[in-house]
Amino acid sequence: MQPIKTARIALIAFRVFLVATLAVPALAADSGAMPRDQTAMPQPVERASVDDCAIFVEVGKNRMDWGVTAPDFAFEPEWDRDGGGTYLEDCPWKELGVAEPRIAAQQSEKRFFITRPKYRGAGATVDLELSISGRIVDGKKTPPFIKSETCTLEKNDRWRIVECRLKFIT
């Protein structure tokens, strides 16, 4: 009788192990989400270049009054890269002469981002977008405010804004 009892306990333990290891992919498949490949290699993280950071600071100073104090908007520094991975706008802000930007935990209603620069010769373009989430006014939620601009920059001794054009505003 003892070997049968031991075999049952082993079978139950094996079933619990299977349920525990297979439950997450099964739930992901049921929810319509793609299950994660547990054997996949971690995706690469590409950090902003020195020129990228100089451009972010120039646009931030010019358009967001970013200086010794950070803008009153949370900065969104992380982007998905084409082909996988992450592009991270993680710059040495203080070394570049500006305050560390606010993060979402410090400012949840107001946000801004500056896209990865697109270079052409001694020039570059970026998009700057700022948003203020909807607020409750007289019991109704207002639509969010969004402003988007495309800024063109040139580099001589340093990056300078040539112009910023309004793309849209809500």
Image (cartoon, rainbow, N blue to C red):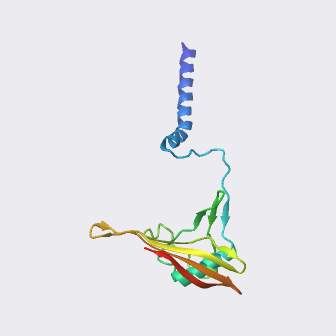
Q: Which residue is drawn at 57% across and 24% down?
A: 10
Closer to the camera in the image, 11 or 73: 73
- For the N terminus, the quadrant is top right
Q: How many marks?
A: 0
Residue 138 percent coordinates (x, y): 27, 70
Residue 129: image x %, image y %? 51, 73
Tell which residue pokes out farthest to the left in this image: 138
Q: Position of residue 99 (x, y in %)?
A: 56, 79
- Quadrant holding the C terminus: bottom left
Return the residue found at the far bottom.
157
Question: Residue 30 appears at what percent x and percent y?
Answer: 49, 40
Q: In this view, does 48 lie to the left or right of 138?
A: right
Q: Which residue is drawn at 57% across and 28% down?
A: 14
36 to 64, vertically: above or below: above
Would residue 25 be seen by someone viewing this image from the given angle? yes
165 w.r.t. 103: above or below:
below
Quick one: which residue is furthest to the top in this view? 1
Relative to 5, say whether 63 is above or below: below
What residue sits 52% from the left and 46% below the top?
A: 33
For residue 113, what is the image quadrant? bottom right
Classify residue 98 as left or right of residue 109: right
Can residue 66 be seen from the camera position used here? no
| Residue at left offset 60%, top offset 75% | 126
Q: Based on the displayed image, in which of its 4 quarters is residue 87 positioned? A: bottom right
Quarter of image, res 117: bottom right
Nearer to us in this view, 156 or 5: 156
